[in-house]
Image (spheres, grey):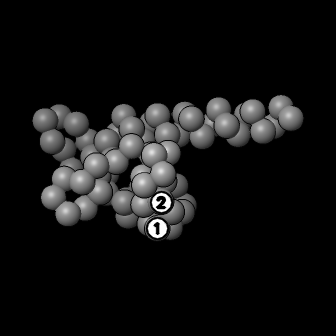
């Protein structure tokens, strides 16, 4: 985790471990626009807020699938 101007940023590997998915999947989510990430230097970084939005969106999609 990196903190820049009081904002927490996570790298791809940290997010992959937290979500139990591969780093390649995280990168694909970023490239597809499902997860907001940005390059700061060389690595992709994802803000804590963007990660929360992604998780909340994922929960909403899962709930919609359950209703069907």
Q: If the image is split into quadrants, where does the C terminus sit?
A: top right
User: What is the x, y in percent for residue 8?
Assistant: 26, 41
Q: Can residue 26 be seen at all in this image of the molecule?
A: no
User: What is the x, y in percent for residue 45?
Assistant: 29, 52
- Disc 1 residue crowd, few under 14, some 14–19, many 20+, Cα 10 Å: few
User: What is the x, y in percent for residue 25?
Assistant: 51, 63
Q: Residue at x 31, y 42 (%)?
A: 47
Marks 1 and 2: CB-CB under 8 Å? yes
Residue receiving disc 1? 24
Q: Residue at x 19, y 53 (%)?
A: 40
Q: Residue at x 15, y 58 (%)?
A: 41
Q: Can residue 21 be seen at all in this image of the molecule?
A: yes
Q: Residue at x 20, y 63 (%)?
A: 42
Mark 1 lies on a secondary structure that is helix
Dot label at residue 28: 2
Locate residue 21 relative to residue 62 in the image: left or right: left
């Amino acid at each position: 985790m990196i903190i820049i101007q009081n904002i927490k940023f996570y790298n791809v590997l940290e997010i992959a471990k937290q979500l139990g998915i591969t780093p390649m999947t995280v990168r694909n989510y970023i490239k597809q626009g499902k997860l907001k990430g940005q390059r700061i230097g060389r690595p992709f970084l994802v803000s804590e807020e963007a990660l929360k939005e992604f998780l909340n969106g994922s929960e909403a999609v899962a709930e919609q699938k359950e209703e069907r």
